[in-house]
Image (cartoon, helix red, strand yellow):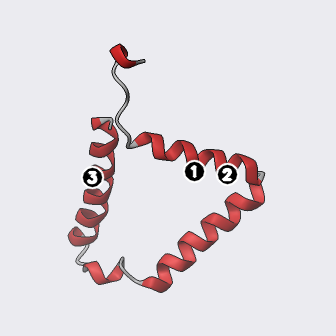
Amino acid sequence: MDKASFAGAILAITGIIAGLMIEGGNLGQILQPTAFLIVFGGTMGAVLLQFPLKTIGAAFGKMAHVFRRRASKATR
């Protein structure tokens, strides 16, 4: 796994939570199932409208590579 990918994910989550807390919010505001469905469903709908299914499938397949450990040069 690439350390930068892991660090980027942690930084993004930390930034969202910190920004919420600075503004006086609480975690319950971002952990709402209805809000998740609206955002995730809307995003997936827009993606499906914009790209062919073959491209979307390839993107999800490639996304798994972000967090996998790369083979060392000696084993390639």
In the figure, residue 41 lies in which quadrant? bottom right
Asked whether 66 or 33 is in front, the reply is 66
Is mark 1 in CB contact (under 8 Å) with mark 2?
Answer: yes
Q: CA distance from mark 1 to mark 2?
A: 6 Å
Is mark 1 in CB contact (under 8 Å) with mark 3?
Answer: no
SS type, badge 1: helix
Nearer mark to the viewer, of 3 and 2:
2
Please tell me whether residue 76 is drawn above or below residue 42 in the rendered image: above
The quarter of the rendered structure image containing the N terminus is top left
Please tell me whether residue 43 is drawn above or below residue 36 in the rendered image: above
In the figure, residue 8 lies in which quadrant? top left
Q: Amino acid at mark 1?
A: Phe
Q: Return the x and y of residue 48 as percentages of the image width and height.
A: 72, 60
Q: Which residue is mark 3?
A: 10
Q: Which residue is mark 1?
A: 60
Q: Measuring 37% from the left and 26% from the top, which residue is drawn there?
A: 71
Q: Residues within 10 Å of mark 2 (few under 14, many from 20)?
A: some
Please tell me whether residue 28 is drawn above or below residue 13 in the rendered image: below
Q: Which residue is mark 2?
A: 56
Q: CA distance from mark 3 to mark 2?
A: 25 Å
The quarter of the rendered structure image containing the C terminus is top left
Q: CA distance from mark 1 to mark 3?
A: 20 Å
SS type, badge 3: helix
SS type, badge 2: helix
Q: Earlier in the sequence, mark 1 or mark 3?
A: 3
Q: Tell me, for residue 23, which label it has, or none.
A: none
